[in-house]
Amino acid sequence: MADLKKRTVDAGMKAYGWLEHRLGLIKPMWAAASHPTPANNASWMYVFGSAATVLLILQVVTGILLALVYSPSASEAWGSLNLLNHNIALGWYLRALHGWGSDFMIAIVILHMIQVFLFGAYKFPRELTWIVGVLLLLMTLGMAFTGQVMRFDQDAYWGLGIGASIASRVPFIGAPLVHLVLGGPIIGGATLSRFFTLHVFVIPGLLLASVGVHVFMVLRHGVSDWPMPGRIVSKATYEQEYHELTQKTGIPFVPDAAWKDAVFAAAILFAVMACAFFFGPFGPGGQPDPTIIQTAPKPDFAFLWIYAVLAFLPPSLETPVLLVAPVLGIAFLLLLPIFAAEGERHWARRPVAVLMVSVIAVTLGIFTHLGTYTPWSPIMEAWTADAVPVKYLHDRTPLERQGAMVLQDKQCRNCHSLAGAGGQRGPALDAVASHMTEDQIYRQVLQGGGNMPAYGNALNPSETKALVAFLETLRGHDLAPAIDASRTLASTGETHTSATPAPPQPVQPHSATP
Amino acid sequence: MSELLKHPGESGSADPTPEEKAAAHSRRSFLFKMSVLLNAAVGAVMAVPLAGYLLGPTMKKSTSAGGWITLGSVDNFPVGETRLVDFDSPAARLGDGETSKVACWVRRVSAQQFQVFAINCAHLGCPVRWFAQSKLFMCPCHGGAYYEDGSRASGPPERGLFEYQYKIAGNALTIHAGGMPTLATQASCSEKSKPLIQIQSANDAAGTEAL
C-alpha cells in the first residue's frame, strides 16, 4: 500500500516536472502568490480589490453564457431577453446573476477606491497603480452603461436618446458625434450593434488587460503597508522602509493573508447569488417602440445621480457643466497621485481627504435618492387618478367646487399635490392661501413664473375666477389667509366697504412674499 | 528571457566599446529600422480605410438622411387640435425593428397652417406628452413643459420643441423626416437660418415669483 502511494506521488511529481520544464510558469506564479507581505496589511480592509476581480470573472462567465442566447439585433434583442426570462431553463437566473453582479461590482470598485484613497495607498511608488485603477473605474461604469443598452427596452431606448442629446451639446462636432454614437441618424439596429461591440469586445478586452497591468504593479510594489500617523511617505526612503518592514514582519500572501480575501470574495458571490435568486433579473421593461410614449424613462441605479443633476441645472449652465465637470473630475482623479505622491498617509492626518470623501458620498447619496422618486417629474396620471380630497370640498360654495373641477381638469395636480397626492414639481397647494394673497395667486396662475408655465391662454376668465376661489379656501389647518396689508390700509383710509375677504383679525404686518 | 541565454552583443560593462558601437550600426540593424518604417507605412495605408469605415456614420449630413413622408389626409386633423401620429422613419435600415417607428405631434392651427413637432424633448430627447386641457406638452424625464405652439414654457429645456418641415400635397399632409433631433441635429430639412441652440428665458413675467 505504502509502495503504491509512493509510486503515485512520484508519478505526480514527474508529470509536474515534465510540465513545468516546458511551461515555466507554475514556479514563478507560486512565487508571486506567496510573496512576503507586511503582516499589518493582512486585514479585512484590504479585501476589496480581489473581490472586484472575482466579480469581473463572474461577469465574464455569465456574460458568455448569456451571449449563447441573446440576439444583439434591434428587432430581436427584447424578444430574446424575454425568451431568456421565461423559456430558457435558468435563463432568468443567469440574467439576474449578471445584473446583480454588475451592481455589486460597481459598489465594490468604489469601496476599493475609497479605501485606497483614505489609506493614502495611491502615494509613491503606487501612483500608476492608482491611475490605472481610475481607468478601471471608468471602464466599469462604461460596462454598466453599455449593459443597460443591452437590455433593449424602453429605458434603454430613451437612455440612448439622453446620451445622444448630451453628445449633441459638444461644440462644433456635436452632429457627427451624435451620429457616431448612434451609428446613423436614428436610434436603431446600428446603435445596438455598436453598444454590443463595446460591451462584449472593446471594453472587456481593455478591462482585462488593465486588470493585468494593475495586479502586476501591485505585485511589483507590494501591497501597501497599514498607514500610521506620522509615518511620512518620502520618495527617498519609502521603498527602503517598506523593504525592511517586509523582511521584519513579512508573511506569505498566500495563504497567510489571502484567506481573508477568499472569505470575503465568497461572501460577495453568495450575496450576488442571494439577490439574483430572491429579487430576480432586471427587466426587460416595455418594448423599445418609440411610439409608445406612456413611459417615464429612468437610468440604472449607478446613473440615477446624473439623471437628478440634469433636472436641477439651469438651462444656461447645463451645457458648460455637462461638458466641463466630468473632464475636471476625471482629471482630478488621474492627477491626484502626481501632486500628492508624498506625505502623510493616515486619514487622521488628512482632514481634507476625509472631508472630500464625506461630501462626495453625501452629495451622490442625496442625488441618487432624489433620482429614485424624481420629484421634478410631472405625474402624468395625477389629474385623473388623484381626486381632490373630500375634506377640501366640505362647506365650499358652488363656485369654489367648480374651481376644484378646474384644478383637476387643467392638470394642475400633475405638478401640485393635495393631501400628499399628486406631482411634486411645484409646491403643495394644501395651504397656498395662507402664504399667497388672492392677487398673487391670480398673477401666478395667469402669468406663471418660477418653474410654472403661464395658464393665461389655457383658462377663460370664469375658469380662472373659480380656480382662484377654490385655491383661496386652501389654508392648511385653518391658518389665517395671506392678506395684502397695503390693501387694508387703503380701504380703511377711504371707506369701510372692504373688498378683501380678510376676516377682521388684528392686522399683522404679514408679508406674503418669500 | 532565460538566464542561460545572453543577448547577442550584450556585455557586462555600461559604456560600449567601439566594436559594440559599430555593431549597433550594422547592416542588420539598418535593415531592421527600415522594416519598422515599412510597417509604419503599411499600417498607415491600412488605417485610413478602417478609420473611414468607423467614422462612416459621421460623414453624412443629418439633413441628407430621410425624406418626405405622408401622415395622411388633412381631414384627420381637426383645426385647433393636436394629435399623435406614427410613421416609419425614412432613415430606417435593415434590422431596426420597432425602433424604426417614429411618433410626432401634429397641430392644425388653421385650415392650411400646421405645426408638426418632434416627440423628443429639446432637453434630453425624452418623449413629451400633450395635454389638451392645459394646452401644454409635458416631459416625463425632467419636467420640461412647452406651450401649444411648441415654445418653451418651463423646466430645463433651453428652447422650444423641434419641428418638422411640412407641405400639403393635394389633401395629404407630408413632412420631411430625417434623424433624431438634438441640439446639434435636425429632425427635418428645416431652414438653416434658425440656430438649434437658442436659450430662451423662462417667463418674462415680472414681479415676485412666489415660492
Image (spheres, coloured by chain):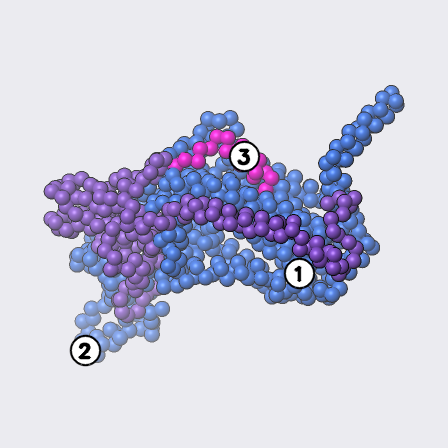
Question: Callout 2: residue from which chain?
Answer: A
The question of residue A61 being in magenta is answered with yes
What residue occupies the far bottom of the structure in this picture? A493
For badge 1, the amino acid type reads Lys
Q: Are marks 2 and 3 on the same chain?
A: yes
Q: Which mark identifies residue A494?
A: 2
Q: Which residue is mark 3?
A: A64
Q: Which chain is blue?
A: A
Question: Callout 3: residue from which chain?
Answer: A
Q: From the top left corner, tell me how far across and down residue A434 is, in percent.
A: 33, 63
The Cα atoms of the two marked residues, 3 and 1, are separated by 37 Å
Identify the secondary structure beneath mark 1. loop
Q: Earlier in the sequence, mark 1 or mark 2?
A: 1
- Drawing shade for chain B: purple
Q: Are marks 1 and 2 on the same chain?
A: yes
Looking at the image, which residue is at 21% across and 59% down?
A456
Q: From the top left corner, tell me how far across and down residue A491 is, in percent.
A: 21, 75
